[in-house]
Image (spheres, grey):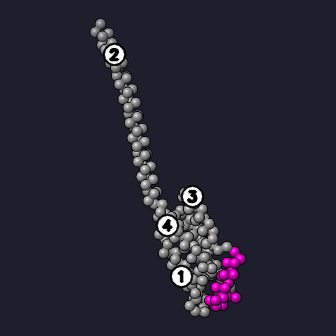
Amino acid sequence: MILFMDANRLIDLFLFAIPSLITGLIAYYFFKEHTKNEDGRRRFLLKKDLQVNALPMRLQAYERMVLFLERMTPSNLLIRVSPISSSKEDYEALIIQNIEQEFEHNLTQQIYISDKCWSIINAAKNATIQLIRKASLLEKTDTANKLREVVLTEMMERRSPSDAALSFLREEVSELW
C-alpha cells in the first residue's frame, strides 16, 4: 500500500512537472528568438546608419576618380600639360609623371570603391601610359609637339582607355541607388 501511494505521488508529481517543463521550454524558445531578433534589428540599424554616413564619402571618392580619369584622358592631358622643351623624351617623362602624381594623389579613394572598379581605373592609367610610350617610340615622333600630334591623332581613331573606366564607374555609381 505504501508502495502504491508512493507510485501515485510520483505520477502526480510528473503530471504537475510536465506542464511546467513545457511552459519553461516554450518561454526559453521565445526569449531566445526575441533576443536573436533584437540583435538582428540592432545590427540592421547600425549598418543602415553606417551606410548613411559612408554614402557621401563613397560618392566623393567616385567623383574624384571621375575627375582623375577625365584629367588623364590624353586629349585633356596634352592640352593641360605643355612641353617645356622640344625633347620628346622630356615631354613623355613630364606627361607620365603628371599621370602618376594624379594617381598617387587619389590612392586613398580605393577604400571607398570596389576592387574591380579600382583595377579598371589602374588598368586605364597603365594603358594611357603605354599609349604615350608607344607614340614616343615611333620614328615619325621626333619632337615634343610631334608626340602631342601623334597621340591626339591616335585618340581620334579610337577610344581613350579612360572612357571604358568612366563607363564602368558610372554603372557602379548607378547601382548605389
> Is 10 part of what is drawn in magenta?
no
- Residue at the disc numbered 4: 60
Residue type beneath disc 4: Gln
Q: Which residues are magenta?
A: 139-158
Q: Which callout, 3 or 2, points at the residue further toward the start of the chain?
A: 2
Give the position of the C terminus as an image quadrant: bottom right
- Residue at the disc numbered 2: 12
Residue at (44% x, 59% y) in the render: 53
- Residue at the disc numbered 1: 97
Q: CA distance from mark 4 to mark 3?
A: 15 Å
Secondary structure beneath label 3: loop
Front residue (pair 5, 29): 29
Crowding around mark 3 (Cα neighbors within 10 Å: few <14, some 14 to 19, many 20+) is few
Specify the label residue 175 is tagged with. 3
Residue type beneath disc 1: Gln
Secondary structure beneath label 4: helix
Crowding around mark 4 (Cα neighbors within 10 Å: few <14, some 14 to 19, many 20+) is some
Cβ–Cβ under 8 Å for marks 4 and 2:
no
Q: Which callout, 4 or 3, points at the residue further toward the start of the chain?
A: 4
Residue at (41% x, 34% y) in the render: 29
**Chief secondary structure of the magenta span?**
helix
Residue at (60% x, 83% y) in the render: 79
